[in-house]
Image: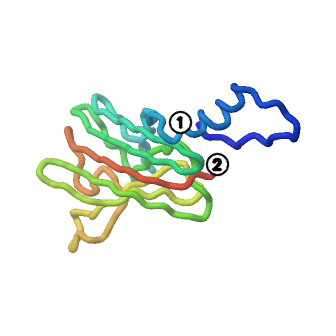
């Protein structure tokens, strides 16, 4: 809701509506409800298809600060595409700055801690997890149909990031 404040003119008569818009509404936007959405899930080669899985997101944008949460739960009819995955963000990131948040992937009895990254100027993000096929598994690789594990029904990915938007 926040927007560029009004420039007042000397001698202008201020109305209640102007005060509400310029002060009250701006202030309340800092405490407003998050916006729910469904982020777009893509892959670098062939896009995955969610099927009966669920993908939800929510975000709060205050000025140029964006707080973003993504929650993916795969289903029995989810297909995983090919290539590395990306998720849409509600606003493009400021240019020249890569910004990192936290992520986790849960599949069967495995749980991997990772990162979500939005590169400067981008409107999509990628998650990075330890590649279970590598030894040692401390190296991070971009999330894909086989990273951090081979994805299957009921597997989950959760990520949250706070980043600076371009506008």
**Which one is in front, 41 or 167?**
167
Q: Which mark is residue 135?
A: none
Residue plotted at (28% across, 28% down): 52
Pick the front one: 78 or 112: 112
The quarter of the displayed image where residue 18 is located: top right
> Which one is nearer the viewer's eye here, 74 or 121?
121
**Badge 2 element:** loop
Horizontal and vertical percent position of residue 28: 53, 36
The residue carrying pointer 1 sits among few (fewer than 14), some (14 to 19) or many (20 or more) residues within 10 Å by Cα, namely few
User: Which quadrant of the rendered structure holds the N terminus?
Assistant: top right
Q: Identify the residue at image location x=44%, y=36%.
A: 34
Which-is-in-front pick, marks 1 and 2?
1
Q: CA distance from mark 1 to mark 2?
A: 20 Å
**Residue 53 appears at what percent x and percent y?**
28, 33
The residue at which mark 2 appears reads as: 167
Say which element carries label 1: helix
For marks 1 and 2, the one nearer the N-term is: 1
Q: Residue furthest left?
A: 109
| Residue at x-position 43% and y-position 46% | 68
Q: Position of residue 74 (x, y in %)?
A: 26, 38
Q: Check residue 28 in the rendering and tell me which mark sits there, or answer none.
A: 1
Which residue appears at 33% of the width and 66% of the height? 140
User: Mark 2 Cα within 10 Å, few/some/many (few <14, many 20+)?
Assistant: few
Location of residue 113 in the rendering, given as x and y in whole percent from the top left corner: 26, 59
- State left or right for residue 155 relative to residue 103: left
**Residue 7 lies in what quarter of the image?**
top right
């Amino acid at each position: 809701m926040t927007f560029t404040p009004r420039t007042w003119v000397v001698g202008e008569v201020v109305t209640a509506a102007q005060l509400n818009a310029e002060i009250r509404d701006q202030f309340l936007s800092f405490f407003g409800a998050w916006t729910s959405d469904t982020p777009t899930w893509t892959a670098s080669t062939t896009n995955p298809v969610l099927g009966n899985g669920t993908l939800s997101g929510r975000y709060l944008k205050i000025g140029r600060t964006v707080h973003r949460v993504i929650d993916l739960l795969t289903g029995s009819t989810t297909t995983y595409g090919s290539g590395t995955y990306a998720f849409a963000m509600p606003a493009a990131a400021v240019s020249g700055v890569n910004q990192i948040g936290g992520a986790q992937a849960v599949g069967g009895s495995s749980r991997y801690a990772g990162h979500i990254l939005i590169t400067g100027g981008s409107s999509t993000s990628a998650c990075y997890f330890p590649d279970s096929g590598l030894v040692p598994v401390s190296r991070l690789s971009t999330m894909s149909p086989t990273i951090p594990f081979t994805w299957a029904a009921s597997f989950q990915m959760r990520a949250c990031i706070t980043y600076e938007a371009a506008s």
